[in-house]
Image (spheres, rainbow, N blue to C red):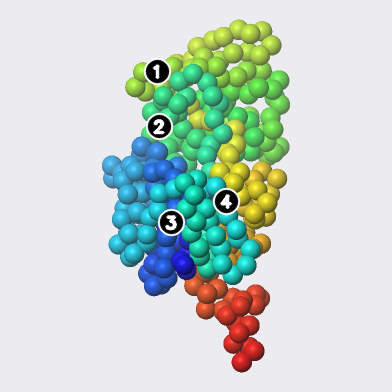
Amino acid sequence: MYDILIVGAGPGGLTAGIYGSRARLKTAVIEKGRPGGQAATTMEMENYPGFFEHTSGPDVMDQFLAHAKRFGTEVIKGQVVDLELEGEVKKVTTRSGETYEAKTVVLSPGAQPRTLGVKGEGQLRGKGVSYCATCDADFFEDLDVVVVGNGDAAIEEAMYLTKFAESVTVIVIHDDGVLDCNKMSTEKAMSNPKIKWIWNSVLEEIMGEELCEGVKVKNIKSDEVTELDVNGVFVFIGSVPNTDFLQGKVEMDKNGYIITNDRMETNIPGVYAVGDARVKYLRQVVTAAADGAIAAVAVEKYLEGHVEGRVTPELLSKLNK
């Protein structure tokens, strides 16, 4: 019986492990793959406080993992396929058939960028292909990049990129002047001299061997394909939370993100959610770590029966005495 069972060993889950173990709670984290989540696939990481020189995502996540283990967090290899979250005892079952019991569960399944699925995208991910301008923009200083997408996130990130890149070309599937973002962002982007536009088009291929060297763009009306010499491709067509296995288990929004309050509590008592899979404003390593710290402290208070506005079994027992 664990005090805290964490599903997913991304930065949020590992931080919850650190805080839970330091609080002398019996803590374990279940992870199906390599610990670290999306951050473990980022070749360069310069925006996590305190790590700024020649730092890679895998290196930082290895330190998160070592830190959690140092305080006693148990790491279990397995893919969670079923959960029983109602009641005082939570049960988590893995694909191999193992079932683990806990007093509380912290959900940290993460999310993944929605990909284009075009030739060269997977091969050059982290080598010119990025899904986060705030993470990688400074690597493209004085270089030419393209942005795929035209929603709020895409246009805001395109404007951010202009602080670093020589030019930013936005590939838009709609007619000339039509964007899916808000009007204010549209006006700002249209007046930015560094931003160029390619309308009625989609990205068809990302070219390069070791690094991105260019792209092929197809006009959806004429079928004409043109090549652009660029050094980077930024894709902003949304993200996909890894929450399919949580359908019907906890409350989620229409896009599959877990709904929590500011204590990371879900709608199920004793169940918390952290990191990119929950509804939040900014999805970064630093915010995931903050989520994990908050969740673990909230768990500690929950187990003590001191959760404001919620009567736990422990508190009810004390009141009855």
Disc with the residue nearer the chain's start (3 vs 4): 3
Q: Residue at x 51, y 14 (%)?
A: 216
Disc with the residue nearer the chain's start (1 vs 3): 3
Asked if residue 291 shows in the view, the reply is: no
Please give the residue where the numbered disc 4 appears in the rendered image.
82
Asked if residue 126 shows in the view, the reply is: yes
- Residue 218 occupies quadrant: top right
Element class at badge 3: strand
Disc with the residue nearer the chain's start (2 vs 4): 4
The amino acid sitting under disc 2 is Gly
Q: Give coordinates of residue 300: x percent, y percent.
A: 49, 72
- Crowd class of label 1 (few under 14; some 14 to 19; many from 20; radius 10 Å): some
- Residue 88 occupies quadrant: bottom right
Q: Nearer the viewer, mark 2 or mark 4?
A: 4
Q: Nearer the viewer, mark 1 or mark 4?
A: 4
Q: How far apart are the alpha carbons under marks 2 and 4? A: 33 Å
Q: Which mark is residue 126?
A: 2
Q: How far apart are the alpha carbons under marks 1 and 4? A: 42 Å
Q: How far apart are the alpha carbons under marks 3 and 4? A: 15 Å
Q: Which mark is residue 208?
A: 1
- Crowd class of label 4 (few under 14; some 14 to 19; many from 20; radius 10 Å): some
Q: How far apart are the alpha carbons under marks 1 and 3? A: 39 Å
The amino acid sitting under disc 3 is Val
Q: Residue at x 42, y 60 (%)?
A: 28
Q: Give coordinates of residue 39: x percent, y percent.
A: 42, 44
Q: Are marks 3 and 4 in contact (CB under 8 Å)?
A: no
Q: Residue at x 56, y 44 (%)?
A: 242
The amino acid sitting under disc 1 is Gly
Disc with the residue nearer the chain's start (1 vs 2): 2
The amino acid sitting under disc 4 is Asp
**Vertical relation: 47 (above or below) 291:** above
Q: Nearer the viewer, mark 3 or mark 4?
A: 4
